C-alpha cells in the first residue's frame, strides 16, 4: 500500500477543499448500540410512532452522521436507496372527463412528492379511475457516479450506493467516494481507476490494490 502525505503547508486550494469536504463527510457506519437505542425509544412511544420503527426494521438507515448540526450532540441518519420517479399515472378528471398524468417521486425509500404533469389548475380527480397500466419507473442519474460506473465490476456496483458518490478534489487529483468510513475518512477511486483510502487526521492518501476494492467495500 502506497502512502501519500497531503501537506498543509502554504494552505493551497486543494488542501482547503479537502479539509472542507471532510467536514461534510463526517460519517460512520451504524453501530448496533445506536440503532438499538433509537429502536427502543420508538418502541416505548405510543403506537403512532410504530411507522418510524418500521423504517429502521426495513433497513432504510445505513449510516449515522455525527455532529451534523448546531444542535449539541445531534446525530442524523443517512439512508439506503436511489432517487427515482414513477410517471405516466393516469387519473380521470371528473369535470372534463379527460385523463390527467401524474408522477410520484421517491428518495432513499421514502416518497417525497408528486407532480401533476398534464392536469389543469382546477381539476376534480376521480380516485376510482386511476390507471397505472403504463406507468414508468426512471432513476435520477448521479453525474459523478456516471464518471466511474464503467470502471466498476458488477459486484462493486452492488456494494456501492450510487447516491453516496461525490467528487472530492484534493492534492491535484479528484477522488470519487465509493464508501464513507468512520471519522470522515472514505474510500475513493479516480477516473484512471486508481483506488485510495483517504484519511483526514493526518491528511493522507493510501493507495490500495485495485482488485482488492471489493474486499474493502465488504468490510
Image (tube, helix red, strand yellow):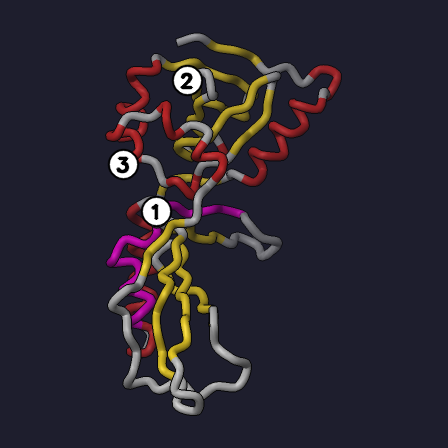
Residue furthest to the right in view is 10
Residue for badge 1:
62
- Where 169 falls versus 79 (above or below)? above
Asked whether 6 falls inside the magenta stretch, the response is: no
Residue density around tag 3, few if under 14, some if 14–19, many if 20 or more, within 10 Å:
few
Does any portion of residue 219 appear in the rendered image?
A: no
The earlier-in-sequence mark between 1 and 2 is: 1
In the image: residue 182, left or right of residue 58: right
Q: Name the mark nearer the viewer: 3 or 1.
A: 3
Residue placed most toward the observer, 203 or 130: 130
Residue for badge 2:
193
Residue for badge 3:
158
Image marks 2 and 3: residues in contact by CB distance under 8 Å = no
Q: Which mark is residue 143?
A: none
User: Separation of disc 2 and disc 3 at Cα?
Assistant: 18 Å
Q: Secondary structure at mark 1?
A: strand
Residue drawn at x 49%, y 46% is: 66
Amino acid at each position: 500500500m502506497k502512502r501519500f502525505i497531503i501537506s498543509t503547508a502554504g494552505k493551497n486550494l486543494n488542501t482547503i477543499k479537502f479539509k472542507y469536504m471532510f467536514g461534510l463527510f463526517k460519517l460512520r457506519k451504524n453501530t448496533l448500540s445506536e440503532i438499538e437505542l433509537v429502536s427502543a425509544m420508538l418502541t416505548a412511544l405510543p403506537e403512532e410512532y410504530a411507522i418510524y420503527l418500521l423504517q429502521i426494521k426495513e433497513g432504510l438507515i445505513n449510516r449515522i452522521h455525527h455532529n451534523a448540526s448546531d444542535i449539541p450532540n445531534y446525530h442524523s441518519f443517512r439512508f439506503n436507496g436511489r432517487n427515482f420517479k414513477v410517471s405516466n399515472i393516469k387519473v380521470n378528471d371528473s369535470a372534463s372527463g379527460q385523463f390527467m398524468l401524474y408522477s410520484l417521486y421517491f428518495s432513499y425509500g421514502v416518497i417525497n412528492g408528486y407532480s401533476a404533469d398534464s392536469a389543469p389548475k382546477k381539476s376534480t380527480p376521480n380516485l376510482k379511475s386511476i390507471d397505472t397500466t403504463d406507468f414508468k419507473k426512471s432513476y435520477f442519474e448521479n453525474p459523478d457516479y456516471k464518471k466511474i460506473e464503467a470502471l466498476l465490476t458488477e459486484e462493486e456496483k452492488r456494494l456501492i450506493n450510487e447516491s453516496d458518490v461525490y467528487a472530492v478534489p484534493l492534492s491535484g487529483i479528484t477522488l470519487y467516494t465509493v464508501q464513507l468510513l468512520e471519522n470522515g475518512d472514505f474510500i475513493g477511486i479516480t477516473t484512471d481507476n486508481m483506488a485510495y483510502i483517504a484519511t483526514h487526521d493526518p491528511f493522507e492518501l493510501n493507495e490500495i490494490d485495485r482488485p482488492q476494492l471489493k474486499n474493502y467495500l465488504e468490510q
